[in-house]
Amino acid sequence: MSWGTYYKHEGYLSRIGQNQIGSKREECQSINDMLWHEILAYMAMTPPVMMKDEEGIEYPWAEFIAMKVREFREEIEDNTRLMARLDDCAEAQEENPENITEG
């Protein structure tokens, strides 16, 4: 017999309707894939000495790439957390649709 922890999760998805759960998850996954491809592109390029950010400020390559990876990682983590919440909601919707409400 296996063992573990059972829990009942109640959550709230701000500005996401019941009919948007699947498409929002796909959107998050698509953004994560795009960010990962951008990270790979930076890794494959020959690093310049200096690089400009979106605001036109120049940074040494090592500092610039560290900032970019940190930004990408934060966004990927935010999307991954939202995807987990969307999965929880989708699972609850399948198991107990009467417990899912919009408001």
Image (cartoon, rainbow, N blue to C red):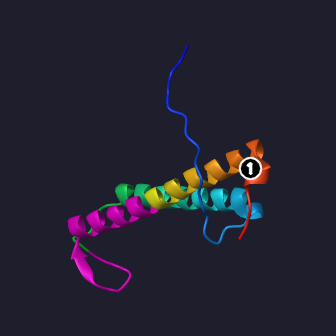
Quadrant of the rendered image containing residue 22: bottom right
Q: Position of residue 69 (x, y in %)?
A: 34, 61
Of residues 100 and 43, which is closer to you in this image?
Answer: 100
Quadrant of the rendered image containing residue 20: bottom right
Q: Is residue 52 above or below residue 80?
A: below
Q: Which residues are magenta?
A: 51-75
Q: Is residue 98 above or below residue 24?
A: above
Q: Residue at x 55, y 40 (%)?
A: 7
- Whether residue 41 is visible here, answered yes or no, is no
Q: Position of residue 28 (x, y in %)?
A: 58, 60
Element class at badge 1: helix
Dot 1, crowdedness within 10 Å: few (<14), some or many (≥20)? some
Q: Among all residues in the image, which is located at the extreme top?
A: 1
Q: Is residue 21 above or below residue 7?
A: below
Of residues 49 and 34, which is closer to you in this image?
Answer: 34
Q: Position of residue 66 (x, y in %)?
A: 27, 63
Q: Residue at x 52, y 59 (%)?
A: 79
Q: Overall secondary structure of the magenta stretch?
A: helix
- Whether residue 63 is visible here, answered yes or no, is yes
Q: Is residue 1 above or below residue 10?
A: above
Of residues 16 and 8, which is closer to you in this image?
Answer: 8
Q: Quadrant of the N terminus?
A: top right
Magenta run includes residue 37: no
Q: Is residue 44 left or right of residue 80?
A: left
Q: Quadrant of the C terminus?
A: bottom right
Q: Is residue 49 left or right of residue 75?
A: left
Amino acid bearing label 1? Gln
Q: Residue at x 21, y 70 (%)?
A: 49
Of residues 84 and 36, which is closer to you in this image?
Answer: 84
User: Which residue is the site of mark 1?
Assistant: 93
